[in-house]
Amino acid sequence: MRPGLTVKLSILLACIGILASGVTGYYAYSTNQSLLVKEAERNLLTSTELLSQRLSAVLNDIAADALTLANMPSSAKVAGFEDVAGDDVAKERLAQVFGTIMRLHPQYAQVRLISRQQFGLELIRFDRDGDRLVRVTGSLLQEKGHFPYVFETLALAPGRVYVSPITVNHEQGAHSAEGAPTLRLATPVVTSTGAVVGVVVINVWLKSLLDSVQSDLPAGHQLYLTNEWGDFLAHPNPAMTFGFDKGRRLLVQDSYEQTRPLFDKTQTSVLVNGLDNPQRAKGQILAFVRKPFGLPENHQFVVLGLARPLEDVLRGGKSLGESTIQMVLAFSVLSIVLAVVFSRALTRPLQMLTHAATSFQTRHALEALPVTRTDEIGVLARCFDQMRKELKSHMEKMSQNQQELRHLAHHDSLTGLPNRMQFFHQIECAIDAVAESGQQLAVLFIDLDHFKQINDQMGHAVGDQVLIVVAQRLRSALRGEDVVARLGGDEFIVLIKGPAIAAEVPAIAAKILSTLNEDIMTHGHRLQVCASIGISLFPDDGVTAEELVLRADSAMYKAKVSGRYTFARYQAAE
Ligand SMILES: Nc1nc2c(ncn2[C@@H]2O[C@H](COP(=O)(O)OP(=O)(O)OP(=O)(O)O)[C@@H](O)[C@H]2O)c(=O)[nH]1
């Protein structure tokens, strides 16, 4: 069975409801996710900027240490001696200070005083070797004049601090510092006359530097650091760092395309998130900040980045997601219920109309209609109600007319008695019925005497009234099962059946004659009617309707001839 209008409408409305709540829920959920990510991005950017400021502060502290050492009068004195041996007492005192600095700052890998003379010979040098502090002396001291951190620092004005690029330390004999990513800060040692006589250099392990910078970073955050070309110096995966030292370039721009503006210097910070860029930053939120690094005239910078898992950020929205799903499910169920209720309410009047139409079509029944409604359905119902009432009245009239026509076809319109056709039908039925039972039938052909005179003398209306009275008297004089019909004009015919009808029929004929002969009062006239009756019997006088009627007619003429107002039996010789 095909679904009805109610089902279709319910499905449509339910689908709309479910779709609307689903879309709303999805929109609320995704908007919330976007807001969470944007908020996390802002916080991450702030953390990254704070981190870069902390890096600056740490570098400033190291620079301050370097300046402190360089500004000590003994530094200039030791560095300024022509003789390498110099003033051993002053050197030893200065070395104790250098050693103290090393002990106080575990992140320092090396602290040195390097002379301008003798190709930048190291004068005082402390190395860190694991937990141990090693003072390098004598022939182990090396010439460092060819290193940029020496010759570039010697060219600096007093009080300025050189910051080297962060590289892997390949200086031989540097104990634990050898092979480790290192940053060098150096400042010139100047005599009271303004002569630059040496440099103080502090080597810092990048790892220690970053550990101190990110010490209070929340768990789950990952640190990125690149140089000004984008080479990774710090990365959650150590294999990704210092690619240039291993003969290949591992650039942040290749990992995160969005960081290019930092290196074009068109932006100072960029944000990347895995929600908007699942290809580039899968499952992560990242913030990158460009930070000037070292001497301003060198236009150096580093890029600091922080990342945190997207999942951590979205975890806060998870409960909202679950609530949203519950809400969507609840609204979907509500939508289905409302859709069914609304559809039924909407289609009920249509169903009433449909039911009323089909009931009217099949049973002509006038079922209830929503005629009291004030909307279009009410108008339709009232029109339909009016139409079916008119149709019903027409149909009833037609049926009545048909009945009347059917009656007229078989009855005489003046007297209401069966007509000739009906009589013949009845007599044929009676012949069929009595043929085998051995019963008899009698046909009485009745013709009024001198009826023409009544018409002529008293008018046709009186004649009609007389015919009506005759019909009534014939009907009342006979039994209910006897057939009385009018053949036409003043001729009537009667069919009587019974086991001994031949013996009874003279008395019946006599009764008819006397009944008809009683006075008739009509139109102010007193009349008397006489009649002549011819009788034929089945099966003695005929076995068909035509024969019986014809022979009764013939007998009636015999009665007329014999003086009227009498009856006569058909005789074959006639
Ligand atoms: N008022 C009236 N007269 C009718 C009707 N049908 C026929 N007639 C008349 O009935 C008369 C019948 O006349 P007949 O049977 O020929 O003659 P009658 O005067 O009865 O003479 P007899 O039968 O020989 O006694 C005619 O004058 C018809 O015009 C009718 O329906 N109403």
Image (spheres, rainbow, N blue to C red):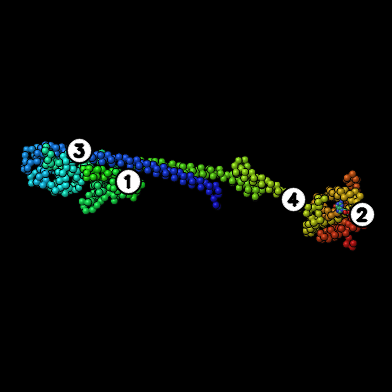
Crowd rating for badge 1 (residues with CA inside 10 Å; few <14, some 14–19, many 20+): many
In the rendered structure, which disc, 1 or 2, sits on the residue that comes first in sequence? 1
Of helix, strand and loop, which one carries label 2? loop
Give x and y (percent) for residue 101. Answer: 15, 38
Give x and y (percent) for residue 170. Answer: 16, 49
Q: Nearer the viewer, residue 510 or 153?
A: 153
The amino acid beneath tag 3 is Asp
In the rendered structure, which disc, 3 or 1, sits on the residue that comes first in sequence? 3
In the rendered structure, which disc, 2 or 4, sits on the residue that comes first in sequence? 4
Toward which corner of the image does residue 37 lie, by quadrant? top left
Cβ at disc 3 under 8 Å from ligand 1: no
Residue identified by numbered label 1: 272
Q: Are marks 4 and 3 in contact (CB under 8 Å)?
A: no
Taking the image as shown, residue 219 lies to the left or right of residue 183, namely right
Discs 2/4, front:
4
Where's ligand 1: which quadrant? Answer: bottom right
In the rendered structure, which disc, 2 or 3, sits on the residue that comes first in sequence? 3
Residue identified by numbered label 3: 61
Residue identified by numbered label 2: 564
* Vertical placement of residue 497 versus 134, above or below: below
* Vertical placement of residue 8 versus 550, above or below: above
The amino acid beneath tag 4 is Asn
Of helix, strand and loop, which one carries label 4? helix
In the rendered structure, which disc, 1 or 4, sits on the residue that comes first in sequence? 1
Give x and y (percent) for residue 463. Answer: 87, 50
Discs 1/4, front:
1
The amino acid beneath tag 2 is Arg
Q: Nearer the viewer, residue 151 or 157?
A: 157
Cβ at disc 2 under 8 Å from ligand 1: yes
Q: What residue sits 86% from the left and 54% below the top?
A: 489
